[in-house]
Amino acid sequence: MLVSLHVKNLALLEEAEVEFGRGLNILSGETGAGKSIIIGSINLALGEKVPKEMLREQAEYALVELVFRVEDEKQEKQLQEMDIYPENGEVIMSRKITASRSVGKINSETVSASCMRNVASLLIDIHGQHEHQSLLHKKKHLEILDEFAGAKLNAKKEILRNCYQKYQKALEEQKQALQDQEGRERELSFLEYEIKEIQEAGLVPGEDESLELAYRKMANSRRIMEAAGNAYEMTGGEASATEQIGRALHELQSAAEYDPAMGELSGQLEEIDNLLNDFNRELSGYISDGEFDEEAFFETEKRLDTVNRLKDKFGGSIEAVLQAKEEKEIRFGHLKDFEEYFAQLSGRLKEAEEELAAVSAEVSQLRQKSAKKLAKLVKGALVDLNFLDVEFVMEFTDAGKYTANGRDEAEFLISTNPGEPLKPLGKVASGGELSRVMLAIKTILAESDQIGTLIFDEIDAGISGRTAQMVAEKMNVIGKSHQVICITHLPQIAAMADSHFLISKQVVKNGTFSNIVLLEEEDSVTELARMLGGVKITDTVLESAKEMKELADAAKESGKKA
């Protein structure tokens, strides 16, 4: 349930704190007092878009905070699946709004607006002033049914979506194949040319790297030979390191007979002399074999150009070129044996369509079964709302095509008078009747989904008298199993309040402010009198308000005993 609402700097509300109770919470007040701001602020906290004009004039920021108490284990588990963990049994949702951005948080952690909406869908259901008008659209009827049908249908619909995607893919492949047939000969010729081009190149994985290395060596052979020649002169020519080491070795050997230490040093230098001689022989051989081969260079350059051209054309690597060749060969085979390929596609499409048809039929069967149950419940709720001789059913038709939602089209039909035929809901119901139908549906959906809090924003449009009384009684019944927050102009509904809040507007120092307070019993009667009689409250009107409140209390008490 919604425990509290805290609003700061939002439209006419400078700052307000509302603590809601269990059962039926009524919000009333004069037109323009700011009742819509309360619902608007709740919507903002739940992740809806932020109109710029909602930020209070000259305020740096606006803040809305909702505190929910989670008492249902199933609800808590669903929240945990969304990585939301109630703290001390509470979920705190807040939204801070500035002129440039807004930040939403759940239990002090920043979350996206979509996350806030998803969490809110588990905790609260808001019926806006004009939401009942959505019943004019058949698409909404099927959405309501699917929501009522619940988990079993949702699981089957997930299978349906997968089947539909498979069917669409097969359909697209067949469509593409038919388009391909027109340019088949042209494409066959082009594919044959490209496959032959790759085959004749005879590419080998890794070949490009060895070619690059060989080409780099040949292209820089002059610089390499110069470096090798210079090194040879320094180590093996006249006045070279070899000659100098030989002289040094002779000197050490001539002195070795006088000092054994000189003999050790002589041995070390002899090893160096041998190593340097070996090095000079290898370097000399490298220079002898390293003559520039112009023909080899040309062939290497030509081969490298061929490899790089194919790499640029077919994917950037030899592996990609060879992969492209395989794909083109498969494509060539499909086009070459088109009839066989098309027959395979047609077989896959037929199989996918049969599978889709079977699942669509199962979904439709589940829907029709749920529709009978839903219609029966709605009819019962409508009788409670003063539709005394009402008939209410759901009619199914075939959409004539497959969709990700099946082949069903469905529409609510209603008859509100004896002997009248059933007709589409949108064509026969007035605004007030649509509002009551939506109230009945919302009540049933809330029961099936175990949503803790229901908000109704001025659902009393277009109703009065006995009907208003029946709606009031229905609100009282809903309030026994749910927390209900209702903005109303009707005293019959307000009289049923378990908690009655008054929203008022006042001007202070050229500024307009809205205020919301919880009314005591006596003040609630005074507000009922205002709703009954307008600005001037006479003793007679006040007595009527007292009587209305007493009758409502008696009805509530009677309901408890029953």
Image (cartoon, rainbow, N blue to C red):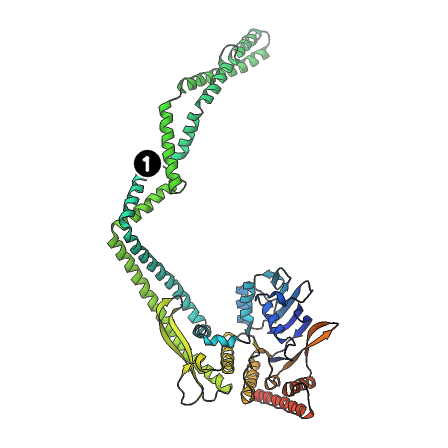
Tell me residue 527's x, y (percent): 66, 84
Q: Residue at x 69, y 86 (%)?
A: 522
Instruction: Work out which quarter of the rendered image holds the C terminus and state it.
Output: bottom right
Q: Residue at x 55, y 74 (%)?
A: 126
Task: In this rendered view, identify the residue nearer to me: 355 or 96.
Answer: 96
Q: Is residue 136 above or below residue 206?
A: below
Q: Is residue 306 above or below residue 431?
A: above
Label 1 Cα crowd, 10 Å radius (few <14 / some 14-19 / many 20+)? few
Instruction: Work out which quarter of the rendered image holds the N terminus and state it.
Output: bottom right
Report the residue marked by disc 1.
Answer: 201
Task: In this rendered view, identify the residue nearer to me: 64 or 68.
Answer: 64
Q: Quadrant of residue 281?
A: top left
The three-letter code of the residue at mark 1 reads Ala
Left or right placement of residue 157 versus residue 348 in this view:
right
Report the number of numbered marks: 1
Tell me residue 328's x, y (percent): 32, 46
Does residue 513 appear in this view? yes
Residue that protrudes farthest toward the front in the picture: 510
Label 1 SS: helix
Q: Quadrant of residue 282?
A: top left
Q: Quadrant of residue 405?
A: bottom left
Q: Is residue 308 above or below residue 185?
A: above
Tell me residue 181's x, y (percent): 28, 53
